Image (spheres, grey):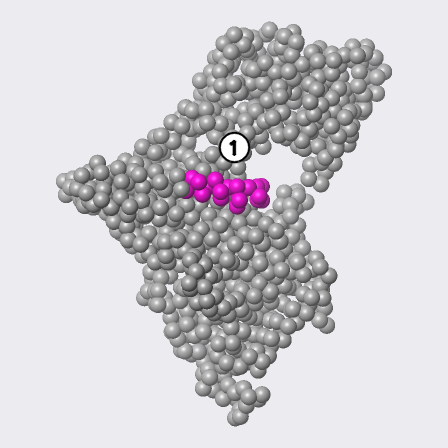
């Protein structure tokens, strides 16, 4: 049963299985295990970014293609839902329509970019996606009439997903059963289904061909696989899932703006998650996203106290200031590309 | 020996073929003409055209190193923008030290200060280029995916270090008095600094062409772009040549950073990665590895950006993407595809 | 025993997952032309590339003029005195003929006497001096490639299939030129599939198949022994006429 759910792709390391189980349990029971707004918010973000990072890994790890447009697709999904919710009002119909619309647009755009730039060289794709995504981000902040510009869009979501909606009176394990909880589980189960879906894709014949193309495009072409077709399909699939993750984010935070969805910072966050977690394995995305979001939320607090503690020393407080955490992540990123390109998952698997 | 068989024979290029290879050269004038038609007003057009040329030449300065580095060793440096930022900040520091000269009304002192700032930036970015090549790029030769990731990581670290050294806020960088203001041509007001940028850019382009066409190093670089193996088989160490080119490219990016910083009059740690978007567009339009293509691409992007900023400001950046798409539809490898020996 | 300039002993070379050279033993005597024969894919080009350091052998030794050169870098091997004319000719098509020649003179200066000798040997070099090398015909490119290899005095010249893709008349001209070059006591290791050309130039000969040397001896011996020719021919010599 579990084997089928995981599409036969087992963690292959007891430690890794343990960590994954811990993350799953933590997320599944987050509202009860870690009560409080901040921790629930963190848990939801982890769910969303696991999907986002996993969909990116489909490209980076399994297809060997570097894209800098993943946040663009993420953003398109988020804006699709946000626009539908703000123009049609807070209804589930709006959510479905917006999500479907956003996902379709993301997929179409990915198809166009893929067909256009994957023909030439993988490196072309990286540059083209970087340029297109940046232009898109600027366009979105320029078209303020439609998108709210830099300020973004704030909107209401259906009442059933809000804190004011009570499913029952009283509490379970001291937690109120309200719409917010419902909303969390909507995010959690959607993320779980999407993740298992991606796991299925990479373990299908299609996924195995992708890896063959990644390892030796020339040979795969010679055997008769249409390399461009495989790469483009992976791009489209990955973009569609990213858009769905964007929709989840839009629903969860009830706000969509360039900084939370389209920015290059988020693109870099995704890169870091996938590389540090481990490229070419879906579980890497789980580990990477979880570690990253936890670090982003809690490590910065730690760094702030370190900054405080070292106040008297020269330079050190500057280096440990919470704003500088990207510095350390960047170094960690470079080192992991050199020394353990298989990331945390590769490490865990190699020591069994 | 039988000389009949090897009698010199050259096929003359047909007019159509000549037009085909010259066509990219016509693009910039054509674009300028279209711009004139769309804008209608001569003075505005002239102002925008000079602005476009200035911008294009500054982008060319930043992009040239990137494209040659790629041509020579198949290395694409996504951290190239870091050199632009570092160059701007070093330039700022030097100009701040030379405040007496930069604020002086004497033109020569102003220019000397800018010149020294440029020199210092180029020295620093060239040196960082050396380290960057050795530490970041060298271990991942021949591996595109890792190159992209690692150089991106280098960019993040460099930007953060700028924050550590110069603080997190944007810094105002003012031009010396003699580079402020505008000169009037008829009804068109043209900023002095733009003319200065055009002059610097043209001098650099001519100089670079001279180096590439008439010096031994330049010949080696061009030969290496086409067939690095053969350059080695002739006894030259291409890794050293590459390191040299990488450093030169980084120094040029630093120079571009000072120029761009003075143009924008505001510098941030992210300015490099922001301008990289246009730099990539230019390199793609020109054909990866082609310096002539890079030059034409830069002029096209500069002109188009300025015309569009006037005609339809909201879609200015998108229009350059459209230009890139258009060029790639016409020539999938860019304007001047680089011949690679197999 | 003749003075051996180049010696390969048990050289194995892998290219990616493929095991191309499977223990090549080869001796090239100083002076004269040694010919390496064999069918396509036998490993002749890989042998030359391994000597040049363009592939690094995984096993075995290569000695040149008393020094071990395997594992050294290509530029170092070139500077030790080996010139290389690759199968694809390695012309810099964006540079002029003259610039190609300038770069080939690693010292930076071309010896005028040598240059005029080359121009006599290959007249198109003089005619097209200022033309981009990319505009030359195939035969002219081959001449340029050989000219580059001999603009500096070298101890050994590796030439990979100079007759490939050329018209018979041009092959004859090329053969003539190489014969004149041979008279200058330059050692040449020639990879060739054209047996006529090989026979008229070669002093010693080695035949390769499946990444090994399957026969080595003098050219005179091979040329005289039709049985041996027949046996090797069926195996590897494809006579292109």
For image coordinates 71% across by 71% down, the residue present is A2
Determine crowd level at label 1: few under 14, some 14-19, many 20+ residues with C-alpha closer than 10 A.
Answer: few
Residue B117: x percent and y percent? 31, 41
For image coordinates 52% across by 7% down, the residue present is C113
For image coordinates 55% across by 45% down, the residue present is B144
Which quadrant of the figure contains the N terminus of chain B? top right
Residue A25: x percent and y percent? 63, 75
Question: Would you identify the image quadrant in which residue A7 lies?
Answer: bottom right
Tell how many labels: 1
Can residue A42 be seen here? Answer: yes
Q: Is residue C181 above or below residue A224?
A: above
Can residue A241 be seen here? Answer: no
Residue projecting furthest to the right: C227
What SS does tag 1 mark? helix
Q: Which residue is mark 1?
A: B240
Q: Is residue A100 above or below residue A313?
A: below
Instruction: Point out the stretch of residues depicted in magenta.
Output: B125-143
Q: Main secondary structure of the magenta part?
A: helix
Q: Does residue A262 show up magenta in the picture?
A: no
Which quadrant of the figure contains the C terminus of chain B? top right
Q: Is residue A294 above or below residue B262?
A: below
Q: Is residue A220 above or below residue C56?
A: below
Residue projecting furthest to the bottom: A169
Residue B99: x percent and y percent? 24, 46
What chain does mark 1 sit on? B
Is residue B210 rendered to the left or right of residue C116?
left
Is residue C166 rendered to the left or right of residue A93?
right
Residue B136: x percent and y percent? 52, 46
Q: Name the residue nearer the viewer: A245 or B334.
A: A245
Q: Does residue B138 show up magenta in the picture?
A: yes
């Amino acid at each position: 049963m579990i084997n089928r759910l995981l599409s036969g792709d087992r963690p292959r390391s007891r430690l890794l299985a343990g960590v994954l189980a811990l993350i799953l349990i933590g997320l599944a029971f987050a509202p009860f295990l870690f009560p409080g707004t901040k921790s629930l918010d963190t848990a939801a973000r982890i769910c969303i970014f696991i999907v986002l990072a996993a969909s990116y890994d489909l490209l980076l790890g399994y297809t060997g293609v570097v894209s800098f447009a993943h946040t663009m697709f993420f953003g398109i999904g988020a804006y699709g839902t946000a626009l539908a919710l703000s123009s049609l009002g807070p209804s589930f119909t709006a959510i479905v329509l917006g999500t479907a619309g956003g996902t379709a647009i993301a997929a179409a755009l990915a198809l166009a970019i893929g067909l256009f730039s994957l023909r030439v060289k993988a490196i072309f794709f990286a540059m083209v996606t970087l340029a297109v995504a940046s232009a898109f981000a600027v366009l979105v902040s320029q078209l303020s009439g439609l998108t709210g510009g830099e300020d973004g869009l704030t909107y209401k979501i259906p009442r059933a997903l809000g804190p004011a909606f009570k499913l029952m009176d009283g509490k379970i394990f001291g937690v109120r059963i309200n719409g917010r909880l419902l909303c969390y589980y909507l995010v959690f189960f959607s993320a779980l289904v999407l993740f298992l879906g991606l796991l299925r894709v990479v373990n299908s014949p299609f996924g195995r061909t992708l890896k063959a193309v990644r390892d030796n495009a020339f040979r795969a072409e010679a055997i008769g696989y249409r390399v461009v077709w495989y790469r483009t399909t992976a791009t489209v699939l990955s973009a569609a899932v990213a858009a769905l993750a964007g929709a989840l984010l839009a629903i969860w935070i009830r706000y969509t703006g360039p900084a939370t969805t389209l920015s290059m910072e988020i693109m870099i966050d995704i890169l870091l998650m996938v590389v540090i977690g481990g490229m070419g394995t879906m579980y890497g995305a789980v580990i990477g996203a979880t570690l990253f979001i936890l670090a982003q939320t809690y490590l910065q607090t730690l760094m702030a106290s370190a900054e405080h503690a070292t106040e008297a020393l020269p330079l050190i407080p500057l280096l440990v200031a919470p704003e500088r955490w990207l510095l350390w992540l960047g170094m960690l990123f470079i080192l992991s590309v050199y020394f353990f390109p298989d990331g945390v998952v590769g490490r865990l698997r190699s020591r069994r | 020996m039988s000389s009949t068989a090897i009698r010199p024979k050259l096929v003359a290029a047909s007019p159509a073929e000549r037009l085909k290879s010259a066509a990219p050269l016509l693009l910039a004038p054509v674009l300028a003409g279209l711009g004139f038609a769309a804008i209608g007003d001569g003075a505005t057009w002239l102002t925008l055209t000079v602005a476009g040329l200035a911008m294009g030449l500054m982008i060319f300065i930043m992009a040239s190193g990137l494209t040659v580095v790629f041509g020579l060793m198949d290395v694409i440096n996504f951290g190239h923008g870091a050199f632009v930022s570092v160059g701007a900040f070093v330039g700022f520091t030097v100009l701040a030290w030379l405040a007496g000269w930069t604020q002086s009304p004497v033109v020569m002192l102003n220019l000397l200060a800018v010149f020294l700032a440029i020199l210092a930036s180029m020295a620093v970015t060239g040196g960082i280029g050396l380290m960057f090549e050795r530490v970041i790029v060298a271990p991942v030769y021949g591996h595109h995916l890792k190159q992209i990731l690692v150089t991106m990581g280098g960019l993040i670290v460099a930007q953060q270090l700028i924050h550590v050294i110069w603080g997190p806020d944007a810094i105002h960088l003012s031009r010396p008095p003699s580079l402020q203001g505008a000169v009037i041509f008829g009804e068109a007001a043209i900023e002095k600094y733009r003319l200065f940028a055009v002059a610097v850019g043209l001098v650099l382009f001519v100089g670079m062409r001279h180096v590439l066409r008439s010096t031994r190093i330049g010949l080696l670089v061009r030969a290496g772009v086409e067939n690095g193996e053969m350059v080695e088989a002739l006894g030259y160490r291409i890794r050293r040549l590459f390191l040299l080119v990488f450093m030169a490219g980084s120094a040029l990016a630093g120079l571009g950073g000072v120029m761009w910083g003075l143009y924008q009059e505001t510098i941030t740690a992210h300015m490099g990665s922001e301008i990289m978007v246009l730099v990539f567009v230019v390199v793609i339009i020109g054909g990866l590895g082609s310096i002539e293509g890079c030059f034409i691409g830069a002029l096209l992007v500069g002109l188009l950006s300025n015309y569009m900023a006037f005609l339809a400001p909201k879609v200015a950046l998108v229009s350059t993407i459209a230009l890139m798409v258009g060029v790639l539809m016409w020539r999938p490898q860019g304007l001047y595809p680089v011949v690679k020996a197999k | 025993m003749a003075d051996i300039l180049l010696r390969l002993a048990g050289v194995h070379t892998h290219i990616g997952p493929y095991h191309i050279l499977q223990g090549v033993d080869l001796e090239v005597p100083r002076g004269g032309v040694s010919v390496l024969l064999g069918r396509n894919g036998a490993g002749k080009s890989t042998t030359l590339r391994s000597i040049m350091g363009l592939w690094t052998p995984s096993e075995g030794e290569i000695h040149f003029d008393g020094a071990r050169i395997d594992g050294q870098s290509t530029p170092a091997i070139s500077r030790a005195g080996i010139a290389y004319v690759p199968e694809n000719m390695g012309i810099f098509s964006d540079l002029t003929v003259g610039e190609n020649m300038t770069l080939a003179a690693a010292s930076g200066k071309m010896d005028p006497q040598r240059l005029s000798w080359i121009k006599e040997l290959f007249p198109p070099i003089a005619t097209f001096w200022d033309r981009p090398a990319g505009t030359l015909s195939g035969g002219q490119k081959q001449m340029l490639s050989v000219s580059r290899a001999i603009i500096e005095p070298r101890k050994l010249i590796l030439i990979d299939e100079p007759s490939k893709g050329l018209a018979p008349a041009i092959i004859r001209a090329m053969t003539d030129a190489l014969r004149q070059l041979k008279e200058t006591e330059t050692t040449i290791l020639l990879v060739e599939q054209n047996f006529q050309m090989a026979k008229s130039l070669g002093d010693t000969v080695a035949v390769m198949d499946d990444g090994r040397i399957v026969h080595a001896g003098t050219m005179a011996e091979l040329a005289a022994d039709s049985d041996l020719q027949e046996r090797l021919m069926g195996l590897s010599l494809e006579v292109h006429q």
